[in-house]
Structures are given as C-alpha cells and as structure tokens.
Image (cartoon, rainbow, N blue to C red):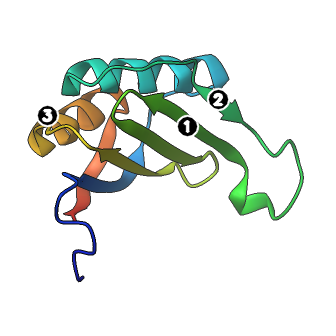
Amino acid sequence: MKDLAPEIFRQRLLVEGRYRADLDAAAVEAFLLELAQALGLSPYGQAVVHAPDGLGQEINQGFDAFLPLVDSGIAAYFWSGPGFFSIVVYSCAPFRPQAALDFCREALDVQGDLAWKEF
C-alpha cells in the first residue's frame, strides 16, 4: 500500500480469532477499555457498543463496538453464534502488537490460532 501521508505516524493491527468468553454489551465495553490500557493507549470517551437485536442474518448477531482513543480508535466486531471476533486497532501512537495478541488470547479465551496482520 502506498503511504500517502508519510509525515503522519500510523500503526494498524487487525486481529481475528474464535472466542469462548461469555460476552454481553458491558463485557465488550470493559474488554475495549482493558485492551487500550494493555497497549498504553488513552481513551477520551466512552465505548459505543451496538447489537443488531435480531436485525439481519442470524449468523451476524453479536456486537459492533468502537472506543475512541486520543490517538485514533479501536473497532471490534463479535459474532455470538460462531464465537468469532475481528478487531482493528488504529493508532497514531506506537504500541506493541504482541501485547494486543496476548491480551485478546487471554481476555477472550481464544480457541486455537489467532490470525493477525499489521498494516
């Protein structure tokens, strides 16, 4: 990918996997806040957590969430039925990707492998 703004530091991490943790909206909010803390990133607002509540396809039921950070944000998506998650950390401050992977693995009780990509 061509870097169209080399003067702006950006670090992005996509993490996906299967989870066994019992999640509700409050647990998703707590997860996002704790992930930010584990990465040394500072939230400046509350996490926003949505659930489609039966709208759309059954397989897509779960949670969509976003936590604004001083240096960008964390978007997270959880599919309840298949126990699958997809998280994007987007930051203009550096963080350790391995810290994110370790935190997700433990906090979400990940089953099997994690797939991840820094970009």
1 and 2 marks in contact (CB < 8 Å): yes
Residue 89 location (% of width, % of height): 34, 45
The quarter of the rendered structure image containing the C terminus is: bottom left
Find disc 2 in the rendering and name its residue.
48
Instruction: Check residue 99 in the rendering and tell me which mark sits there, or answer none.
Output: 3
> Upstream in the sequence, badge 2 or badge 3?
2
Question: In the displayed structure, does residue 43 sit left or right of residue 66?
Answer: left
User: What amino acid is found at the position of numbered circle 3 in the picture?
Assistant: Ala
Kindly state the secondary structure of the residue where label 2 is placed.
strand
What is the CA distance from the residue labelled 2 to the residue labelled 3? 23 Å
Q: Residue at x 20, y 42 (%)?
A: 101
Residue 80 location (% of width, % of height): 62, 45
In the displayed structure, 28 sits above or below 94; it is: above
Q: Residue at x 61, y 17 (%)?
A: 26
In the displayed structure, 9 sits above or below 92; it is: below
Instruction: Check residue 66 in the rendering and tell me which mark sits there, or answer none.
Output: 1
Residue 94 location (% of width, % of height): 14, 39
> Upstream in the sequence, badge 1 or badge 2?
2
